[in-house]
Image: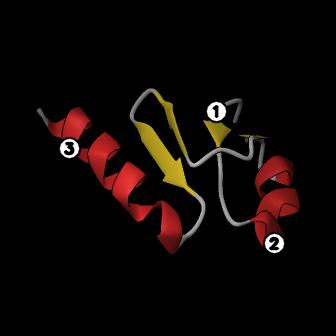
Amino acid sequence: KGKRATSVSAIKDDMTNAGANWVDEEVVVDGNLITSRTPVDLPAFAREIIRALI
């Protein structure tokens, strides 16, 4: 609850009902939580995962 996150827009309501602060961005990093929207966003998502691991 209270974490910023993104997802496909089809589950936006589910995310907010679960307590997320949903935003429409390519990738969202909030602490150790890294989320993205769609396969099109995969390059940016992979960059953030790599950044978190190194």
Quarter location, residue 3 = top right
Q: Is residue 12 above or below residue 33?
A: below
Q: Earlier in the sequence, mark 1 or mark 3?
A: 1
Residue 34 x, y percent position in the rendering: 45, 44
Residue 41 x, y percent position in the rendering: 49, 60
Q: Is residue 37 above or below residue 29?
A: below
Q: Which residue is mark 1?
A: 3
Q: Are marks 2 and 1 in contact (CB under 8 Å)?
A: no
Q: Secondary structure at mark 2?
A: helix
Q: Which residue is mark 3?
A: 50
Quadrant containing the N terminus is top right
* Residue neighbourhood size for the residue with mark 2, other residues' Cα within 10 Å, grouped as few (<14), some (14–19), many (≥20): few
Real-space Cα separation, disc 2 to disc 3, in angstroms: 27 Å
Q: How many marks?
A: 3
Real-space Cα separation, disc 2 to disc 1, in angstroms: 19 Å
Q: Give left or right: position of 4 versus 27.
A: right
Q: Secondary structure at mark 3?
A: helix
Disc sitting over residue 10 in the figure: 2
Q: Residue at x 57, y 49 (%)?
A: 26
* Residue neighbourhood size for the residue with mark 1, other residues' Cα within 10 Å, grouped as few (<14), some (14–19), many (≥20): some
Q: Earlier in the sequence, mark 2 or mark 1?
A: 1
Q: Residue at x 57, y 69 (%)?
A: 38
Q: Give left or right: position of 32 versus 26.
A: left
Q: Residue at x 53, y 55 (%)?
A: 36
Q: Secondary structure at mark 1?
A: loop
Residue closer to the observer: 17 or 44: 44
